Image (cartoon, coloured by chain):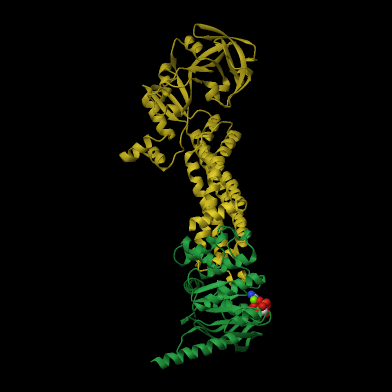
Chain colours: A green, B yellow
């Protein structure tokens, strides 16, 4: 089966000023439509890896291809344009513009992508079950609600890749379940998902868990879900072959 | 969307913006006050500097041209020649182009007489003469034009009163309250001395009497020997200098421009054209002093305004830097969701522009008022509100905000977005 990789990380290292080796020679391939979890102890370099994948930070060495694009030599503005076309970001600390309402925060992402359409923004909020909270300011929303606004914003431009850094780190179980539901439906739509998490339950919801330790990939395992999908795909492939 | 963001940012966090508006407001109020002061300083300084004396002297043509006969100067002394007192009123008549620049007129008539057995110079002047002019009522005379005259005692108010110059008073042993018997030819006149004059010039050696009284003594009713005119003028520049060197060197265009500008020379020329048989000359020393002090002071105030502007933009930079630092996460987020650095810059500069213009508009209201107050403080007179100063204010506000905000925003936009977003 020939698939272009959604993300290809080759021998990436990151040394922060001050000499911290946050990433050491990390290589990683993420298939299109794949859902992987990045796990590992605190300080193992998960956030650093994600920041390099979304272009907000630069690797010290190594190469990154996202959706087949070589990002070598990208400046901050090239990355900004690349992100708005292709990548949706979800942060642990939510990060909403405090003086804009929920729907306006979502529309802001539309604004930088193409043009703001209120109906679409409202539909995106509906998808994360926040239609009733569209006109509230972030300060008037709970943490779980704010995180779902962030997810709606990450999805509004229909990105091919969604990168989430501990999206449920600050959420209660109920909100965690809701976020997980959204991820499942995104996965079903064929989006590539990279989710940094401490939570094994979230990790196991994906197809693959990449474990980082001291800036290195220490383990790369398929989850039960991953195995199931793999065999399902194999079956579909056989059936297709058979039908030919 | 941009306007929506701006509107929300401005209205939902108004108190935070207030500080920068106030900074621009206060700073620009000072700048504008100084600017309006600098506009006024020309007129006001000229008024003030009138204390140096009159700046145009009008004489009969005959006495202005020296006539030498066998080595003797045969001008005013030998053959008295006069101007008509009534002609002087034309200086304030509606038909005279520079009537509003004429601040005062002091006609004089000279006579030689005797008092207490000694020769004395007698000068007739207007003290406070109400003059019927086309427009507003004007009281003019020595008291208004010779602001440098210091009178010990009282100014004459009646026809039979006079001042005695300080040197003459010593010579004749006169003091305020004394009576003085004067003889001019066969005419006699008794005057009461109300005050002793110190002028610092040759008037100190004269008896200063009412114009009409002296006219009577010399049998020249309605005549004057000369008139000192105090006029509001513009300092000489290259053009005026060129005219002074050689009037014929001016092109017709230049001449028109010169003629229609209140240079001392141009006003004098037109005064001379107005009054038949007269020669008007600029009392050069005074005009030059006026012009020099005028332009130096003006330059100084403009410099002060510029310095104030710089200091203000520094303080605005400080305030905006703090405001921008606080909003770094917001900027990093905008970049994370796809805004290029220029997009963020535009957004923040637009917001700062609104704040700056708001501060500028407020300053447009208060600056000229402060300027007016300064003028009244410094010159003791009221100033007009200058439209140009008001109009330029919003643009200065914009400039101030951008000058102060561009650098911190550009710095913040080039920050390490990942670090900011992860709260490091
Ligand atoms: N800006 C920075 N400057 C210097 N060192 C940094 C910087 N950011 C991260 N580090 C260091 O790099 C290492 C990896 O950090 P990173 O944030 O990627 O860890 P993480 O796996 O996301 O941890 P956590 O689970 O606590 O979020 C850590 O040792 C951290 O201290
Ligand atoms: Mg982290």
In the rendered image, which quarter contains the N terminus of chain A?
Answer: bottom left
Residue lying furthest right? A42
For this rendering, which residue is in front, B270 or A49?
A: A49
Where is residue A152, by image quadrant? bottom right
Where is residue B72, by image quadrant? top left
Q: Quadrant of ligand 1?
A: bottom right
For this rendering, which residue is in front, B283 or B326?
A: B326
In the rendered image, residue B276, in percent from the top left (x then y), is placed at: 36, 21
Is residue B67 in view from this perspective? no
In the rendered image, residue B247, in percent from the top left (x then y), is placed at: 35, 37
In the rendered image, which quarter contains the C terminus of chain A?
Answer: bottom left
In the rendered image, residue A239, in percent from the top left (x then y), is placed at: 44, 91
Q: Residue at x 52, y 13 (%)?
A: B113
Is residue A4 in view from this perspective? yes
Classify residue A169 as left or right of residue B394. Answer: right
Q: Height in image: B378 above or below A188?
A: above
For this rendering, which residue is in front, B83 or A199?
A: A199
Classify residue B154 as left or right of residue B38. Answer: right
In the rendered image, residue B51, in percent from the top left (x then y), is placed at: 55, 29
Q: Height in image: B242 above or below A100?
A: above
Where is residue B65, by image quadrant? top left
């Amino acid at each position: 089966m020939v698939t272009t990789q959604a993300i290809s990380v080759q021998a990436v290292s990151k040394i922060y000023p001050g000499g911290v080796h946050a990433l050491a020679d990390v290589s990683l391939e993420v298939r299109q439509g794949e859902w992987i979890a990045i796990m590992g102890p605190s300080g193992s370099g998960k956030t650093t890896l994600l920041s390099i994948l979304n272009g907000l930070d630069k690797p010290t060495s190594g190469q990154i291809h996202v959706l087949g694009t070589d990002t070598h030599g990208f400046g901050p503005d090239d990355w900004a344009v690349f992100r708005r076309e292709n990548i949706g970001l979800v942060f642990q600390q939510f990060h909403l513009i405090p003086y804009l309402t929920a729907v306006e925060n979502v529309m802001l992402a539309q604004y930088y992508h193409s043009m703001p359409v209120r109906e679409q923004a409202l539909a995106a909020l509906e998808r994360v079950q926040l239609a009733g909270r569209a006109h509230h300011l972030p300060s008037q929303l709970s943490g779980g609600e704010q995180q779902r606004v962030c997810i709606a914003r990450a999805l509004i431009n229909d990105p091919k890749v969604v990168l989430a850094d501990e999206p449920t780190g600050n959420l209660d179980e109920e909100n965690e379940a809701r976020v997980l539901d959204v991820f499942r439906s995104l996965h079903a739509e064929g989006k590539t998902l990279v989710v940094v998490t401490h939570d094994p339950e979230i990790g196991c919801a994906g197809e693959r868990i990449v474990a980082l330790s001291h800036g290195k990939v220490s383990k790369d395992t398929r989850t039960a879900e991953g195995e199931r999908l793999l065999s399902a795909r194999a079956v579909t492939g056989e059936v297709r072959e058979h039908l030919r | 969307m941009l306007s929506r963001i701006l509107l929300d940012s401005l209205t939902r966090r108004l108190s935070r913006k207030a500080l920068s508006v106030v900074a621009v407001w206060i700073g620009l109020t000072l700048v504008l006050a100084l600017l309006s002061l600098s506009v006024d300083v020309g007129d006001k300084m000229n008024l003030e500097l009138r204390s140096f004396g009159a700046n145009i002297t009008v004489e009969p043509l005959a006495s202005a041209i020296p006539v030498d006969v066998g080595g003797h100067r045969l001008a005013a002394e030998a053959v008295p020649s006069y101007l008509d007192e009534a002609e002087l009123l034309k200086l304030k008549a509606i038909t005279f182009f520079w009537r509003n620049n004429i601040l005062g007129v002091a006609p004089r008539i000279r006579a030689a007489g005797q008092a207490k057995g000694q020769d004395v110079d007698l000068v007739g002047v207007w003290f406070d003469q109400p003059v019927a002019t086309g427009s507003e009522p004007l009281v003019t005379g020595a008291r208004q034009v010779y602001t440098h005259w210091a009178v010990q005692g009282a100014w004459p108010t009646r026809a039979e009163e006079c001042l005695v110059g300080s040197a003459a008073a010593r010579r004749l042993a006169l003091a305020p309250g004394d009576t003085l018997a004067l003889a001019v030819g066969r005419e006699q006149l008794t005057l009461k001395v109300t005050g002793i004059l110190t002028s610092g010039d040759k008037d100190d050696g004269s008896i200063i009497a009412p114009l009409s009284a002296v006219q009577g003594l010399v049998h020249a009713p309605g005549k004057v020997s000369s008139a000192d005119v105090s006029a509001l003028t513009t300092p000489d520049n290259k053009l005026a200098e060129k005219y002074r060197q050689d009037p014929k060197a001016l092109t017709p265009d230049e001449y028109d421009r010169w003629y229609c500008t209140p240079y001392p020379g141009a006003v004098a020329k037109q005064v001379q054209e107005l009054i038949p048989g007269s020669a008007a000359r600029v009392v050069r020393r005074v005009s030059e002093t006026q012009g020099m002090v005028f332009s130096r002071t003006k330059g100084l105030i403009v410099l002060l305004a510029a310095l104030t502007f710089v200091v203000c933009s520094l303080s605005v930079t400080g305030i905006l830097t703090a405001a921008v630092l606080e909003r770094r996460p917001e900027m990093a987020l905008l970049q994370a969701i796809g805004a290029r650095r220029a997009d963020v810059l535009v957004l923040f500069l637009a917001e700062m522009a609104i704040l700056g213009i708001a501060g500028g508009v407020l300053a447009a209201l208060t600056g000229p008022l402060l300027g007016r107050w300064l003028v009244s403080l410094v010159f003791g007179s009221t100033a007009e509100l200058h439209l140009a100063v008001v109009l330029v204010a919003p643009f200065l506000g914009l400039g101030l905000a951008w000058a102060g905000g561009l650098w911190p925003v550009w710095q913040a936009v080039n920050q390490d977005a990942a670090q900011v977003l992860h709260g490091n």
